[in-house]
Amino acid sequence: MTLGNDPTWTPPTAEALADHLRRFRATPPSPWARRLPLLALLGLTVAALLTPVPGSWLLPWGGFIALAIYGTRQVAKVRRFERRLDRARELLSLRYHRPALRSAWRLVPELTQHPALQHRAVAILGQALEELRAYDAAAAAFDRLLDDLPDEHPGSVALRLQKALGALFTQRLSDADDALRRLRGPIEATGAPPLAAAYRFARLFQAVQTAHYAEAIDEGDGLIEALRPLGVEAGYGHALMAWCYRQRNQPDTDDREQARRWWGRATALLPAASLRHRFPDLRGLGRD
C-alpha cells in the first residue's frame, strides 16, 4: 500500500486492514524461547565444571558476555520501536493523519513479537483512519484490539464507544443507539472523566444525526464543563451545538447569536477547516 501526499490515495478498506492485521498478528515468544539464553548459559557452566580442560572456566564467562550483548541489543531494538510509535502518535496529535497512518501500517509487521507495542500501532491506525473518515476500516482496527481485552476493561469500553461513533458517522443509527444504550452503565462504572465526556459528545452527535436539535439544546446545560476532559477535541462538540442552534433557528429566540457563540468556542479550540472536514454539514457555519 502506498501512502503519502498522492491526491489519488484512499485509505485502506476494512477488508484490506483486517487482512493486514490477520497476516501479521503478534504472538509473544514461548516461555521456552524466553528462557533459552539462560539455559544456554547454564549449559556452558555445567560443561565447564565437568570438563577438566585448561581454560574451560572461560566458557561461562563467554556465555555471560554473549547474553549481555544479546539483551542489550534487544532492549535497544524495543526502544527504537517505542520511539517510532511515539513519533507516529505525535504526527497524529499534530493532525498529520496520513503520515501517522503510514508509520503505524509499516510498524505492524515489525512488531509480531511484541504484542503490547503492536497494540499501540493498531490503536494509531484506528484513530488515524477515523480522522480520515474511513470509519469501517477504523472499526476493523478497533475490533482487532477488542479481541484481546475483557469487556469490562476501560480500554474495551472506550473502543466500543469509538465504534458507536463510527456507526453514527456512517448513518447506522440503530446500531449506534443500541451500542450507546449498552455502554451507559459500563461508562458510569468506570468513573473516568474522559470516557464520560466522550459519551456526552456521542449523545450530542446522535441528537444531531437524528435531527433532534431542540432536545440537544434543552440538554445542553453544563456542556462546556462536561466536554472539557476531551481537550481541544471538545471543539467538535461546541461546533455541533452551534449547528443545533443554527438548525432550530426559532424567530423568537437568539438562536443565530447562540450559534455564533458556540462556533466561536469551537474555533478557539480547533481550526474551522478541521471542524468542517470532520463534519461536512458545518460548511455554512461561520460564513454568515
Image (cartoon, rainbow, N blue to C red):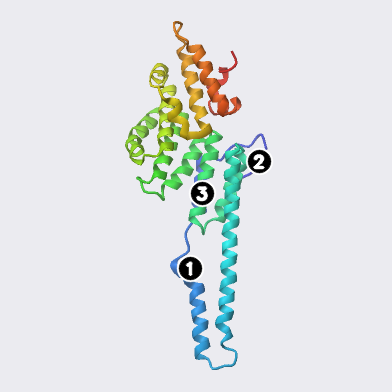
Q: CA distance from mark 3 to mark 1?
A: 22 Å
In the picture of the structure, the residue carrying the numbered disc 1 is 34
Say left or right for 56 vs 168: right
Count the numbered circles shown: 3
For label 3, count other residues whose C-alpha is less than 10 Å away and answer few (under 14), some (14-19) or many (20+). many
Image quadrant in which the N terminus is located? top right
Q: Secondary structure at mark 3?
A: helix
Q: Tell me where residue 251 appears, x and y as whole percent.
A: 46, 6
For label 2, count other residues whose C-alpha is less than 10 Å away and answer few (under 14), some (14-19) or many (20+). few
Q: Amino acid at mark 3?
A: Arg
Q: Tell me where residue 165 appears, x and y as whole percent.
A: 44, 33
Q: Amino acid at mark 2?
A: Gly
In the picture of the structure, the residue carrying the numbered disc 3 is 120
What residue sits 46% from the left and 43% below the top? Answer: 142
Q: Tell me where residue 45 appears, x and y as whole percent.
A: 51, 83
The relative height of residue 7 versus residue 257 in the rendered view (above or below) is below
Q: Amino acid at mark 1?
A: Arg
Contact (CB < 8 A) between labels 2 and 1? no
Say left or right for 114 vs 88: left
Q: Secondary structure at mark 1?
A: helix
Q: Which mark is residue 4?
A: 2
* Quarter occupied by residue 156: top left
Taking the image as drawn, is residue 25 in sight? no
Taking the image as drawn, is residue 251 in sight? yes
Q: Nearer the viewer, mark 3 or mark 2?
A: 3
What residue sits 60% from the left and 89% below the top? Answer: 55
Q: Secondary structure at mark 2?
A: loop
* Quarter occupied by residue 185: top left
Of labels 2 and 1, earlier in sequence is: 2
* Quarter occupied by residue 157: top left
